[in-house]
Image (cartoon, rainbow, N blue to C red):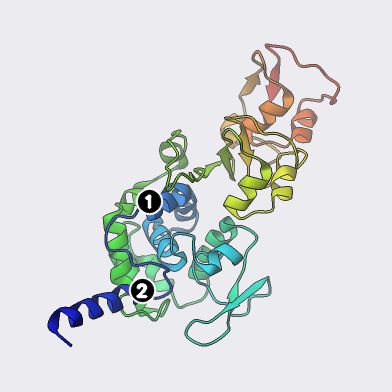
């Protein structure tokens, strides 16, 4: 075998040796960027709640799920390769370090992100990592490998490479939702199939509907039952969605965020009780109840509505 062939063979082997990832990632990749754009707000939320760097969460999600395209992610919404380990929920089996291993399966990617945080914060294995600064993504990467999160000897380096290539460390600077999550950024597109950006408000996730969207198409993209999404939005599952409409991805809250404790919403032209409830992520029934109104009340422009 000549030297050139040996070099090519070794290069291919190194590209394939990526742990649980689906594809090698050494240069900028549009699918990786698309995944980041879609899930960055989820990672920031987890960081603010659990003190795990958003950069680490995103890098692990990318690496473990192949940017959301692995079998575990597609069939089980498992974005972090977490095995069962006493898990009593739904499971999915596939070959990994051993044959037919048991992995956790989730109802949605959001549940996977939340469980990943709980997994790292429970028990003693990863406790020392929480003494690191939130911006020390290198320390977290090497700490995860040392604690046995993955068997790939290059795991820490792979995480660091991804974080640096996509500048994920910028998300570790977030101190609240407003700066990062209220911007209406443009959706990215890969191969003509754009993904919706997942945003966060009032302890919930939402997207803006695009022309042609249905509850079914959104459910298939996000990995949530379309019937549940319709129910979360207090709609029939076959209802048409208007472009720009807010679609909530979990059950809405009973009231608006705390900053609205002493603030009312004043009804504007074209608004309805439903569109107002959607705007603030409040259940329609709760909005009526808070204001002592019945569903047959015809709201008027200028009406003051309590939100908490």
Please name the residue shown 39% across and 79% down the image.
Answer: 147
The quadrant of the image that shows the N terminus is: bottom left
Q: Residues within 10 Å of mark 2 (few under 14, many from 20)?
A: many
| Badge 2 or badge 1: first in the primary sequence | 2
Please name the residue shown 43% across and 73% down the image.
Answer: 20
Q: Furthest-front residue in view?
A: 1
Callouts 2 and 1 close, C-beta under 8 Å:
no
Q: Secondary structure at mark 1?
A: helix
The quadrant of the image that shows the C terminus is: top right
Q: Nearer the viewer, residue 65 or 51?
A: 65
| Residue 297 x, y percent position in the rendering | 83, 19
Q: Secondary structure at mark 2?
A: loop
In which quadrant of the rendered view does residue 89 lie? Answer: bottom right
Any part of residue 249 in sight: no
Q: Nearer the viewer, residue 112 or 190?
A: 190
Query: Which residue has dot 1 on it?
Result: 33
Q: Nearer the viewer, residue 204 or 13?
A: 13
| Residue 31 x, y percent position in the rendering | 40, 54
In which quadrant of the rendered view does residue 53 lie? Answer: bottom left
Query: Which residue has dot 2 on it?
Result: 18
Please name the residue shown 47% across and 48% down the image.
Answer: 38
| Residue 164 x, y percent position in the rendering | 27, 57
Image height of 187 relative to 74, above or below? above
Q: Is residue 61 left or right of residue 206?
A: left
């Amino acid at each position: 075998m000549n030297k050139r062939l040996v070099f090519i063979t070794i290069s291919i082997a190194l590209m394939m040796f990526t742990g649980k990832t689906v594809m090698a990632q050494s240069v900028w990749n549009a699918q990786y960027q698309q995944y980041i754009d879609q899930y960055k707000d989820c990672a920031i939320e987890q960081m603010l709640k659990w003190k795990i760097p958003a950069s680490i969460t995103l890098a692990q999600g990318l690496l473990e799920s192949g940017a959301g395209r692995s079998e575990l992610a597609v069939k089980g919404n498992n974005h972090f390769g977490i095995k069962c380990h006493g898990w009593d929920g739904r499971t999915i089996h596939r070959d990994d370090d051993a044959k037919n291993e048991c992995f956790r399966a989730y109802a949605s990617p959001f549940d996977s992100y939340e469980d990943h945080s709980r997994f790292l914060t429970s028990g003693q294995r990863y406790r020392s990592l929480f003494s690191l600064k939130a911006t020390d993504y290198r320390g977290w990467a090497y700490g995860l490998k040392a604690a046995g999160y993955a068997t790939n000897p290059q795991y820490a380096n792979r995480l660091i490479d991804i974080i640096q290539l996509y500048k994920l460390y910028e998300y570790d600077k977030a101190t609240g939702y407003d700066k990062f999550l209220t911007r209406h950024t443009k959706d990215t597109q890969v191969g003509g199939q754009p993904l919706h950006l997942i945003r966060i408000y009032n302890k919930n996730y939402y997207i803006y509907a695009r022309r042609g969207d249905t509850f079914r198409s959104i459910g298939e993209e996000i990995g949530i039952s379309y019937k549940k999404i319709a129910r979360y939005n207090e709609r029939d599952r076959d209802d048409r969605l208007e472009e720009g409409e807010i679609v909530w991805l979990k059950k809405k809250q009973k009231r608006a965020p705390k900053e609205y404790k002493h603030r009312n919403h004043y009804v504007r032209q074209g608004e309805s009780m439903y569109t107002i409830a959607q705007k603030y992520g409040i259940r329609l029934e709760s909005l009526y109840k808070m204001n002592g109104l019945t569903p047959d009340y015809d709201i008027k422009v200028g009406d003051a509505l309590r939100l908490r």
